[in-house]
Amino acid sequence: MAEKQAQTKDYGHPAHPRRAREIARWSQEADVVVVGLGGAGVCAALEARAAGAEVLVLERAWAGGGTSMQASGQLYMGGGTPLQKACGFDDDPEEMWKYLVASCGPGADEEKLRVYCERSVEHYHWITGQGVPFKPSFLPIEVGTDPYTDDGLSYTGSELAWPFCEIARPAPRGHTAQQVGENAGQLMMEILLRRAVEAGVRVVTDALCEPLIVEDDGRVAGVVARIGGEEHAVRARRGVVLCAGGYIHNKDMLARYAPRTRRVRFRLGCDGDDGRGIRMGMGAGGDAIRMEAACVVVPFSRNRGFLKGVLINEHGQRFCNEDLYQSLLGEIGLWRENGRIWLALDDEVYEKPQLPTQIVAVGETWEEVERESKLFAPGTLSRTLASYNEHAARGEDPLFRKEARWLKPLTAPPFVLLDLTLEKYPFWSAFTLGGLHTRPTGEVLDADSRGVPGLFAAGRNASGLPAHGYNSGLSLADATFSGRLAGIAAAKAKG
Amino acid sequence: MAEKQAQTKDYGHPAHPRRAREIARWSQEADVVVVGLGGAGVCAALEARAAGAEVLVLERAWAGGGTSMQASGQLYMGGGTPLQKACGFDDDPEEMWKYLVASCGPGADEEKLRVYCERSVEHYHWITGQGVPFKPSFLPIEVGTDPYTDDGLSYTGSELAWPFCEIARPAPRGHTAQQVGENAGQLMMEILLRRAVEAGVRVVTDALCEPLIVEDDGRVAGVVARIGGEEHAVRARRGVVLCAGGYIHNKDMLARYAPRTRRVRFRLGCDGDDGRGIRMGMGAGGDAIRMEAACVVVPFSRNRGFLKGVLINEHGQRFCNEDLYQSLLGEIGLWRENGRIWLALDDEVYEKPQLPTQIVAVGETWEEVERESKLFAPGTLSRTLASYNEHAARGEDPLFRKEARWLKPLTAPPFVLLDLTLEKYPFWSAFTLGGLHTRPTGEVLDADSRGVPGLFAAGRNASGLPAHGYNSGLSLADATFSGRLAGIAAAKAKG
């Protein structure tokens, strides 16, 4: 345990690149060297190999998989995939793009989103072509947003919720590989990893990469890796593809770039998500962007009936429609409400929370709840509820236009206030979204937006599709799709 | 004009460093080379010179001054300065630090704030020792926050406003050089620039710096400068100090790092604020942090009486106390309210706005204003006002605890709603706060938080005291104080 602690506190020093002229001996070489064998790395390797390149993957863990292997396994795809059609849903790339631009927040990469939406159906065929199965059945939103069943298709965002339902025609776009009992990310990764071996991708595990190796003109020539306790210089004839994940497990980086996210204690990612790949790229001249951005999830709606409750901020006000997707609520809850949110329920709506939390106050009236909670100014929470109830009784929510199926006046005592604050509700979770600035095709750019020759990045090692807003499945989308493109670009790069 | 346009669109390519081994001839050299002669640069030069170094400053404009020269000239200092004492105010470093940590928002650099608060009185003596005069008189907040008079001391933040008045004992800390008719920044800079010449600092103007020059081991050896149409390699024996300002005038950088700030059209800074110095530092391995942060100002309170109005968000809700300082309102208005805010006034409070804006709606009742505006759901704005008025009549603001002197029920018709939205109210202004990651003493750090040998940064070229919250005077504080420390560190660095 002490060892583990020591290890996680040492984030290494990959930002200081090594000079190619100082390398006495290259111990290995390949056309394309991929750093990290998660979702991005395996797809980069597969496509680079398919393009005819000799490919070597260096993975720091004892086996491939990365964070994708731990993922629940939703892949955000759309624009009219065969699975969407089989389940009876219409979709097209334009509607998908409009939705993603709006829901992925200020700073979403519109160009990357454009390419992804236009090629999403092709990407579906590629993924299924690798052998990943999707069951042609739809999981209705009333049942859940997390894939506990083996249904292939579900809503994994705020497509049905206001204002998005007015911005783009809704369609479910969460594609989950068919799997029972285990997380679907594991199934997908096992299939892709097997494919990579079959395709002749060379994999070296227990290989911790540290700095990149650069020529005098700035071109990336390879990477230093510690394998079996020894330092090896690995040459990349065409390019290095950084696929080493995000940085949610690096507290120093969180403090520097994303101090708000640092407050979220449940951090999603495999051990390797310490930002090493991002720092390797920065050291070689790569620019890191959107570094403050993160996916933040507040999963109060595991109890679907809780959508009939009312979310309250520290001023006793409502602040959003309760049927927004859990990751958009996280974004708003952290950046707008500073982590201070509560859920108001009445007796008819209340049920035992699937994710336990504290009851802040109970009362026979909302005034009593307001008073007991000692949280709100007199006449704030109670007026908010009075107004909500008045409208809900008419099936209306003029303020935030929550869907009618979730509207019900909260008028059945006793009334309850549940604590969802970041400090008290331990189920807030997060992972980082910022990373190296890349072209949609994967080339890493420097601070002047010019390419760093020989360097590519994908998955969470790069800044991808979302910024200040998230939908589940976008990280596997980024991993698999940007991984593919970066692999192709690296294979075609001039050495 | 076409030339000017072409020039401002070409942000150069300073991020790709030059190799020292490739420099055929060094045309100039000095112990310390300072890039940029604004407030940070001149203080760096003065202190490096005082420490015995030979100092060369390279300035891209035809004369020194930079953005500090354009500033209204408030310097945030405190902890018990002679000026504070002369005006009858008690202050100490601890209260100052508590206030700044709270008001400079998530991500404020607590260590830099600590050093600054502890040395603020010393800094006051240094500034006045250079000959900068402060008139020992206090400008009451009822009169204004912008220094239109020659009074030396004023509140330039939210010290008196809730919740800050409960966090730290308030004191005014805006120190403005005595000047009538011109902005005080100009006076201060003219004095400091004269001092630099007297002290033997060499200055070359019309010298546009592009990349840094680095040794094979990463040490910064100098800088490339275009002087008189020719490229010169300038060697720094001890260190280069980057003092080339922020990046508010670089649209590409705003799009990459601060897409929200990009929406603010009135951008504060001299022509040189195109982020060149930040990119030079990044190219040499420097890490840039807090790049999404900016000072955003919404100056509705030029009419002091407007503090008696009520600020409204797009949900018809209040969202903060109206007596928060204008730059904190800007932060909240942009990040929390997405630039969509309005001001509600009654006939007694209304007066012609000093900064003209549109009247959205007028009515004999708040219900009528709500309806006419077509902006809010029924019963939102009107209930907000009803609640506000009820409490204000008792001299209370339980929701946001606005100071009693600004509380008055808005019950005198006709009622008015003024447009303060980012899209319609053109007086929102902004400048960037993100920059190179430095130690409090000015050394630039890489992405592993290790020093880049030979490289220093100060002022807006570095990430300074504030992050997601701003008080006027902090930029001149950062410029002058961090400039001084970086100059000293560079002069003492091992060559």
Image: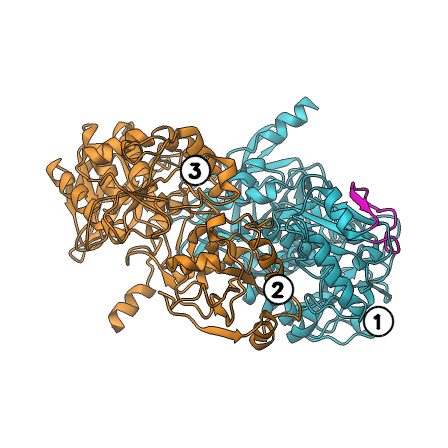
Chain colours: A orange, B cyan
In x, y percent, where is residue B132? 79, 59
Q: Main secondary structure of the magenta part?
A: loop
Disc 1 marks a residue whose amino acid type is Cys
Residue topped by disc 2: A315
Label 1, label 2: how far apart the Cα atoms are: 37 Å
Disc 2 marks a residue whose amino acid type is His
Indicate the secondary structure of the residue bearing disc 2: loop
Q: Which mark is residue A170?
A: 3
Q: Residue at x 67, y 74 (%)?
A: B166
Left or right, B134 with reference to A434: right
Left or right, A223 with reference to B163: left
Q: Nearer the viewer, mark 2 or mark 3?
A: 3
Q: A135 above or below A82? A: below
Indicate the secondary structure of the residue bearing disc 3: loop
Residue B457 among magenta residues: no
Identify the magenta region. B346-364
